[in-house]
Image (cartoon, rainbow, N blue to C red):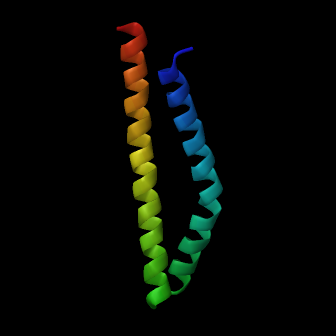
Amino acid sequence: MDLLLWMTVGFILLGFIVLISMKKGMERKLAFITASTEGEESSTRAKSIIRWIAGATAWGVASMFLVVWCFHHYLG
């Protein structure tokens, strides 16, 4: 197997593991925000949820790029 394929599979699996491990914490932060809408702590937790969503989106886009690159490399 080529290094590109290992890199792609490793990146995708590692990303899934990180997202799943952080999911419960984000759910707790969201529950706290919906329970109390005011305060500095709610704002900080909301920003961390937004960063988590942005990171998950960037990971998804990078994963799609790597998969397309692998298809192009092996089938092209």
- Above or below residue 14? Residue 37 is below
Q: Residue at x 65, y 55 (%)?
A: 21
**Residue situated in front as seen by the camera: 12 or 1:** 1
- Above or below residue 53? Residue 64 is above
Q: Name the quadrant of the N terminus.
A: top right
- Give the total number of marks visible in the rendering: 0
- Above or below residue 24? Residue 4 is above
Residue most extreme to the top? 76
Residue most extreme to the bottom? 39
Q: Residue at x 43, y 42 (%)?
A: 60
Which of the 4 image quarters holds residue 29? bottom right
Q: Position of residue 8 (x, y in %)?
A: 50, 29
Which of the 4 image quarters holds residue 63? top left
Q: Position of residue 20 (x, y in %)?
A: 62, 51
Q: Position of residue 16 (x, y in %)?
A: 58, 43
Q: Name the quadrant of the C terminus.
A: top left
**Residue situated in front as seen by the camera: 73 or 37:** 73
Q: Is residue 18 left or right of residue 67?
A: right
Q: Residue at x 41, y 29 (%)?
A: 66
Q: Position of residue 26 (x, y in %)?
A: 57, 66
- Above or below residue 52? Residue 18 is above
**Residue situated in front as seen by the camera: 36 or 44:** 44
Q: Residue at x 39, y 56 (%)?
A: 54
Residue most extreme to the front? 3
